[in-house]
Amino acid sequence: MSTSAAVAVAPSVRLGREQMERRFYLLAGCIFLIAVALGFKQFYLHGQAFAGRPLTPQIAPLVVVHGIGMSAWVIFLIVQSSLIVSGNRKLHMSMGIGGAVLAAFLVVVGLLTALGSVHYRPQTFGFFGGARHFLIIPVTDIVGFGVLVAIGFTNRRRPEIHRPMMCLATVFAMTAALFRIPFIRGPVGAALHGSYFVVLAPWIPMLTLGLLLGLVKWLMSGTWDRYFARGWAAIACVCVIQVFVAHTTVWDRLAALVTG
């Protein structure tokens, strides 16, 4: 192959990889939507909480707002990814501000929902060793989502950082949905039930999904995304650390302010 031909092929290869990467994020958004539909099927179809329990009466409106908001976030992610695939980057950037506002709203509502859940129904979290241990799970989940979205939004003009961070933020937010799916919750819960690491149980499906998405991205684009890998590794470290934090006296005292 001549030098001129090689130069002509190189941009074509890069363009092909870029298109595959854009399609990957659209695919990831669709996977998130399926996970949410499966995990919160009882909520969407019957207005019920996990295992067919009624919504906590004191915070029922908050739970509904939180559920609708998270659904809106996933749909927003799919729309944004579709705009990039179709080449409409200008509209994608314009809608980004709205996404940042929605994410900030979800962090506030998510924290209020988590605090209200353990305050009004502490008896429902016995699987995790009690409401105080459980509380660290949604707090870590919601704060982690907010931090990753903030990193992604700050780097919105650097797609190599923006895209993986927004995707991983949504992976983090999939924790509750994935752990509610019976064929996932069953074996994971059985393996860790009653153990010191039981609060790690909801994170395992989420981390597995993140790892699988990283591999799919590599296969589709032909390149290893170091930002995606570092982000996933950071999430994994946080999940492990929170196991030990949940068993500290400091956390127990803080959680007691909420659970009573």
Image (cartoon, rainbow, N blue to C red):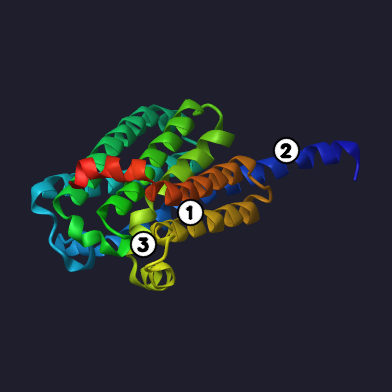
Residue 75 visible in the displayed image = no
How far apart marks 2 and 3 lie (CA) works out to 43 Å
Secondary structure at numbered mark 3: helix
Q: Nearer the viewer, residue 71 or 87?
A: 71
Looking at the image, which residue is at 14% across and 57% down? Answer: 55
Whichever of labels 2 and 3 marks the residue nearer the N terminus, that label is 2
Where does residue 166 sit, x and y in percent of width and height? 46, 40
Local crowd at mark 1 within 10 Å, few (<14), some, or many (≥20)? some
Looking at the image, which residue is at 42% across and 73% down? Answer: 187
| Circles 2 and 3 in contact, beta carbons < 8 Å | no
Quickly name the residue at label 3.
179
Q: Which mark is residue 226?
A: none
Task: Between label 2 and label 3, give the one nearer the viewer.
Answer: 3
Task: Between label 1 and label 3, give the one nearer the viewer.
Answer: 3
Q: What amino acid is found at the position of numbered circle 3 in the picture?
A: Phe
Where does residue 234 sit, x and y in percent of width and height? 54, 43
Secondary structure at numbered mark 2: helix
Where does residue 254 sit, x and y in percent of width and height? 28, 40
Secondary structure at numbered mark 1: helix
How far apart marks 1 and 3 lie (CA) works out to 21 Å
Local crowd at mark 2 within 10 Å, few (<14), some, or many (≥20)? few
| Circles 1 and 3 in contact, beta carbons < 8 Å | no
Quickly name the residue at label 2.
11
Q: Would you say 1 lies left or right of 114 here?
A: right
Q: What amino acid is found at the position of numbered circle 2 in the picture?
A: Pro
Quickly name the residue at label 1.
27
Asked if 151 appears above or below 49 in the picture, the reply is above
